Each structure stands twice: as C-alpha cells, then as structure tokens.
Amino acid sequence: MEKTVTTIMIALLLYFGHTSAQVKTFTGANWISSPDSAACPVFKKRFLITKSVRTAILFITAHGLYEAAVNQKKVGEAYFTPGWTDYAKRLQYQSYYLKQLKRGDNNILVTLSAGWYSGVFGEDMKQDNYGKGTALLAQLIITYQDGTQQVISSGADWLRSTGNIRYSDFYNGEVQDERVRPENWKKVTVENFNKTSLLPTISEPVTGQETFRPKRIFKDSKNETIIDFGQNLAGLVKLRIKGKPGDTVTIAHAEMLDEKGNFYTGNLRDAKATDVYVLNGKPETVHPHFTYHGFRYAKVTGFIPSYNNCVAIAVHTNLKHTGTFSCSNPMLNQLQHNIEWSLNSNFVDIPTDCPQRSERFGWTGDAQVFCATAPFNRYTLNFYKKYLADIKADQGTNGAAPVVIPDFEQQKDTIKQGVAGWGDAATIIPWNLYQVYGDKTILKEQYNSMKGWVDYITAESKNNLWTTNGYGDWYAPGPKTALPFIDQCFWAYSTQLLLNTAKILGKDNDAKTYEKLLGRIKTAFQKTYKNKDTTQTACILELQFDMLAENKRQYAADKLAVLIKINNNHLATGFLGTPYLLPVLTRFGYTKLCYTLLLQQTCPSWLYPITKGATTIWERWDGIKPDGTIQQTSFNHYAYGAVGQWLYEDMLGIRPALPGYKTINIQPHPDSRLKWAKGSYACAYGKIVSEWKIIGSKVSYHIIIPKNTMANIELAGQKLKRVNAGDYHFITTNNVCL
Ligand code: BGC
C-alpha cells in the first residue's frame, strides 16, 4: 500500500495534523486486526528507503491502545494513546515526527492492547464496552529531500504476531513473558471499520514523570516483601531484573498498610493491580506498557528489591505547572502537596475520581468541584477542552449530561439522566475555564451543551421545582441535606452561568428567557425551602448561588457560622458543600472561622488525614478512623482538595477581575495563626506574586503584577488605587494601610 500522494494533500495533512477538527487523514489506510490473538497483537511493516528523508510523520490510532516503535525506537513518550473518548463518536489520532528512519531496510512495529475500548473495565468488570477486540490504523508519510513522497499505510500487506505482552488491562495489570518475541508472522485481517469519528488529539499526552526510589524495603508480619515508595501516586513500578528463564516475578500494588502494618488491598474492589513478568535469563529492565496502578506500596515475589533496582514512576497527563503555594504551617504545606498529588494521579487523559480501584471513571461531579483549583496548579485548558467535548458528545438528545464521561455504561441509551452537582459540569467547567483563560471560544463551543443541560432540567421540573434522585452532598458527615434543596440550587446556578454566557455571546433573546427562568427558580426556592437550611451545606449552597434575597443573606451566613461552632468548629460537608465552604465564609466576613476550620486537626477536617500520614487527598474525611480502622475507600480522590481554590484566591488573594487576568484582584486575607504565606500564579501575561508576613501588629505584603495587566489591590479591607504592572511592598498596621 505504498504510493505517492500529491503535494497539496501533504500540505493539508501537515496543516491540519495538529489543529483542525476533522480531516481526511488516513486516506488509503485500512483498519487491520489480529482476530485470533489472545495476547496483545503486534503488527509489522518493513519498508525500504533509497533517498534522503526531509520529514517523516506517522499518523496513528487504534481501537484499544497502541505503542509503536520504528527501527526498534519507541515512537513518542505517551502512554495510553489514543486516549479515552466515546470512540464511536470521537476517536483521536496522534501524529509524530520521526527522526529514526535510515536508508535501506526500515520497520515499524505496533503493539495493541484492549484498554478502555474492549478491555476489562467498569464496575462489573465488563469487556467490550466500545466494541470487540483491537484494531490499528496507521499512515506514515515520508517526504524526501527531492520533494517526492512515499506513504506507508496500514493494510493487507502488514503482518501480525504476538510478543512479550501476553495480557493487559487497567484494573488487573499486565502479564509479560520475556521469553516470547514476535515470530511466525501471519497475514492481518483488513477491517471495514469507519473512519468518520477520527479527530486530532486535543490534550497533552500522558507520560511517565516523577520518579521515586524506595523509601523503605521491609517484610510485613506475613513475611511478605514490601517496598514503600513514600508517595501515593498513579503510575507503575520499573524493575531491573535477572533470573533463570521461566522464573516469575510479581508486583502487587496497594495504597495502604493495614492496622498491623501489612499490605492492604481491601479498597481495590475487583482490581488485582498486579503485574507479572516471566523472565528469560538475561538482565532486563521491565515495566507495564498498557496499565497503571494507584499505589504507594508494592509487594514483590520472585525478586529481591534493593534501593537501586526498582523505582516507581508517576504516570499522568503532562501539564505545565502554573502555581506555587507555601506558608509557615508545615501541615498546610503538606495539604497543598496532597492536593497536587491527587491532581497528578487523577489527570490521566480524563479527570478520574480515583486511580486505584476498579473504577477510575470521569465522574462529572468530581471534575466540576475541582475545576477551579486545578488551573492554579497546572495549565488545564486543553485537558478540560477535551473533556468538555466528551461531555457534549455524550449528552442525550434531551440534553441530560451523564454522571460519568466518557459515558461508556449508558452509551447505547438515547435518553439519559442528569444529577444535580454532577451534570452541572456542563455549565460550571466552561464558565470556570473562561474566567481563568479568558478564551470565549470555550463558551461558544460549549454553548449548546450548557443550554441543553439547563433545558433538560427545565423540562423535568414541575411548578418551577426540580426534584431528582442523585448523590446529594456525597459522603457528608452528619445530617443530610435534602436532595430537592440541592437540585434547586444547582439548577439556579447552571441557569445563572448560561445567562452570563448568553450575554457575553450576544444571544439577547436567550438572555431574556433565562433571566426570567432564573427569577422563577429563585422565587420557587424562597417559597418552598424557607427555613429549610438546617445543614452547613444547605446554607453554603443558598449563599454561594445567591438563592436568597439580599437582605436575607447575612442572616444565613451567621446561621452557617453557628452551625459550624455548635459542631465543635468542624465542617460537616461532603462533595458539593465543601468547595464553597471557605469562599462563602470569607465573602460574609468569617475569614477567622475559615482559618479555624482549615487548621483543625481532628476528624472531619483537611488536616486530619495528614495526622494519619496521608500523601494524597482521601475520598472520605475518615478514610482511616480515629481508632486506626482503615475503611474500604479511595485514598486518592481530589474532590476535597477543592479547598486549594481558597488558598490561592483568599489566603493569597489572587483572582481574575476580568476573565483571563487582564485585570487582577489582589485581596489577601492574613491571619495571625500563620506567620507568613506566599505564592504565585503564572497567568498568560506572566507571574502574579502575592506574599504576606505578620510582624508583630503589622502585616507586610509583597505583590508582583505582571506586564500588560493592571490590578485592584485591597489590603486589610482598604481598597487601594488601581495599580499598573510592577513590584510592590505595603505594610498595614491595625488594619490600616501605611
Ligand atoms: C466515585 C465518586 C463519584 C460517586 C458518585 C463514587 O464511586 O468514586 O467520586 O462522584 O461515586 O457519587
């Protein structure tokens, strides 16, 4: 299937390769498969080069996951390509510039694994969620120095075999037999799968990043050999091994040790999380290629680990770091560390809930509660754009946004359902991204999706009230907040965001419609739920979403403060209330109470898990109970890490006054229980810095405003004049700015 293509087509391919929506890449290439392979299939194509090469670009995708090598050199650094999308509607491909071609004989080898497409995945450990088996589609376009081109396309002239990867799935792990190398090459099957859903990859790739050497290697009381890597993470263990041919090494993964200090896998549900290597007698470095695990500890058999022959490698989407935060309290610094590590561990192509158990879905609720915190720490624009496109693709014809995106469980249903606080990801994520990055195209691209979600709720509502089943304030300790109360608040919030968006996009008729709708939602709320705000979360949501008449708001905030105080200065909030708890308290003048909650060390609180040695954020406040009992829960869930937004926006006081930070608000909130706090956020114009120190009765501030921006600075409740870019020092004393 080698042929010369026209220069125009090449130019189009190069132009569109990384940027446009959908193109006719892969013209002339055919899907190929290896239908009877139980192990991961390997495809091969040899080709001859007789002239000098100017450029060589490989376009490639798969049903399943692929890893390609050209002339024995791995192509790119990414894991889990082509990524996870609703494949029938959107299948990403990647393009790579190759440098390793040479005159003479060349070869391309591609290994496939079932991955999200057809591998074991989902709470019932189902297979074939998107289709059967695996398949490859590839095209290598070589441009020679003399201007001619050669195209190598997947098709009937490729060969197939199997190699050392005998099995792989995300939950159970990978089995490699290092004695097996591909041989007995057979003809491939050419498939007639369609190519209409192909599109260029949107987000940064998942790559191997931070490396951790063992911190401790020990035998537990069951005489099992355990490696402690010191950090809970999503990733894999890489080993240097040598043994007799046929020897077997196993690596099981776990996040925790149990109460007796033994390896604990009780929270992994059905995931075996175990990699197996059968050795070939030669020294080798091995690691899994098509799976990852959530772990801090590894239990090994058939191998004697040392501090030099094994490492843990964190594997996650390669996002640029944007922010820094530190302060005089080491436990708060550990909290920031844990937020970043739950971010790392759950930004694996999609925003997952957790990286360890047989779940790891793109729960929309988790994604929306964390989407204001993540950008302070990482550059998330492309990552969330992809996820938003996934939401749009998976919304039902009725506009309902599924609770899990990509929506593999309900994918065949046309009628879908939506849940308050989860489906609202469709409005909240685009709106937050617009605030952070100032990019209106996000709003344009998502407008119909946002509108679809609000229209769905409106159609479901009766007498201007929305009541639906849902997860509510998931895992809130203490009294439950009524679901209908939560439903109505999120309906209002989504409508408000849609209304804001309609105004920005100049959709005046829509703006009028949704303004009226919002009025009706709030009036119905005020009539129906008067005095029903009996929980912390109820007060938080009605305040955060402006559900009450203005003259009723301070009273509700005072009530929230009382509810916290009578709860012995502890929060009682779950997934939906927690992100807004501190922002609401600060907005209504209770910043001192924020610090009390933030510095609280007994359960439930943000610092309690740290007293138990947490290196990531837990799914439940009491993942380990005060008596030491371990719960079967995730120890790596970023949802409660949403407090990170308050650390940046209120403790440091950095937030956009205009979308994208062209104008910045600086309004730090120091508290004498800390000596200092400092941090930065790299917006598109440069680094914003905010730092404060308590010196006796004075507070000194250091603020840097980047070029081409302006800032409104407010210190100790006193508004200063608008300032230009620059490096500023201020001192306040007794709440007066000197
Ligand atoms: C997930 C959560 C998710 C929830 C729905 C759980 O199993 O881990 O993070 O949002 O289900 O309530």
Image (cartoon, helix red, strand yellow):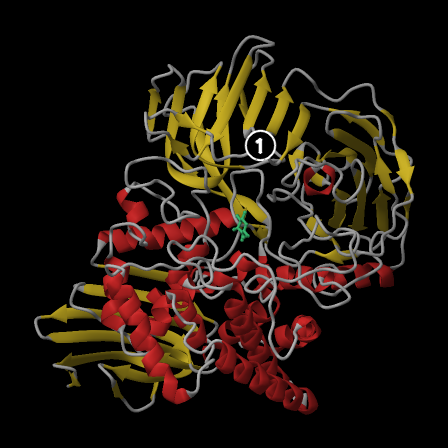
Q: Position of residue 38 (x, y in %)?
A: 76, 25
Which residue is at the far left?
696
Q: Position of residue 391 (x, y in %)?
A: 67, 62
Q: Position of residue 209 (x, y in %)?
A: 48, 44
Say which element carries label 1: loop
Instruction: Give the vertical position of 160 relative to 359 (above or below).
Output: above
Q: Name the quadrant of the C terminus.
A: bottom left
Q: Residue at x 51, y 49 (%)?
A: 346
Name the amino acid, label 1.
Asp
> Which residue matches tag 1?
270
Q: Is residue 71 left or right of residue 283?
A: right
Q: Residue at x 39, y 53 (%)?
A: 339
Front residue of this view, candidates 181 and 171: 171
Quadrant hosting residue 670: bottom left
Front residue of this view, candidates 315 and 582: 582
Q: Residue at x 64, y 91 (%)?
A: 512
